[in-house]
Structures are given as C-alpha cells and as structure tokens.
Amino acid sequence: MTVQRISSGGEFEAKVGYCRAVVAGGWVHVAGTVGKGEGAVEQCRSALGIIEKALAEAGASFADVVRVTYMLPDRSEFEPCWPILAVTFGANPPVATMIECGLIDPKFRIEIEVTAILPQ
C-alpha cells in the first residue's frame, strides 16, 4: 500500500510533526485544521478552504467526505457556522460530531477534521 503525505506548510505542521493529510488505502485523512481570521465564522471559512485544497491534492472533494469532526472552545459559536457547512457539504452530508474543548491557541475558535473516501 502506498501512502501519500500532503503538507500545507502550516506553522504547526513542523512544530508538532504532522502533515495536513495522508492518503492511504483509498482514504483521505485530513488533520484537524484551523483557519485565519477573527471569530469562528471567518475561521470556519478559512479552515474549509485549507481542507478543500488538501482534498483536491489527494484527488477528492467535499462530496467524498464521509466524517467530519468540529472542535470549538465555545459551543455557542458553532451555530453561526451552520449555513457555511450546509453549503459546503450540500447534497452529500457526512456524519458529524461537535466537541467543545480547548484548542492549541486561544485565538482559534474552530478546528475541523475530515475523513474522505477516494472516488472510484
């Protein structure tokens, strides 16, 4: 089995020792991703853009995502993100989990992790 590692060059990839995504066994595993901006909504859009780029490099898209995990330090900031997520996943919604937890830096308001299956 071949393994493809995809890096986005994010600051934490080198500091922590991980890559943005790993393609293995027909699956694309995208690491928890934070975005830039002020607040959860802006960071959600930014994180999704980073994830979309990693998925594309792997040969997949949001239509291929089967699982998504949202992590937020304050669950009340999740609902304003819902319209963005509904548009992003459209007619192909994945299973989803939202966890309220601390993130690596208090400036981050949302972290998103996805798993996708490579299209046949």
Image (spheres, helix red, strand yellow):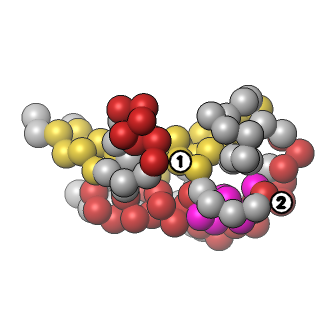
Q: Secondary structure at mark 1?
A: strand
Inspect this view and state whether residue 56 appears. Answer: yes
Q: Secondary structure at mark 2?
A: helix
Instruction: Tell me, for residue 80, which label it has, or none.
Output: 2
Residue at 84% from the left image edge and 39% from the top image edge: 74
Q: Quadrant of the N terminus?
A: top left
Q: Which residues are magenta?
A: 40-46
Q: Is residue 7 above or below residue 22?
A: below
Instruction: Tell me, for residue 33, which label it has, or none.
Output: 1
- Amino acid type at image mark 2: Pro
Q: Is residue 81 above or below residue 94?
A: below
Q: Residue 32 appears at what percent x and percent y?
A: 52, 41
Q: Earlier in the sequence, mark 1 or mark 2?
A: 1
Pick whichever, 118 or 80, lies toward us. Answer: 80
Q: Quadrant of the C terminus?
A: bottom left
17 in magenta: no
Left or right for 50, reference 77? left
Residue at 62% from the left image edge and 34% from the top image edge: 104
Q: Residue 112 appears at what percent x and percent y?
A: 58, 46
Residue at 48% from the left image edge and 61% from the top image edge: 50
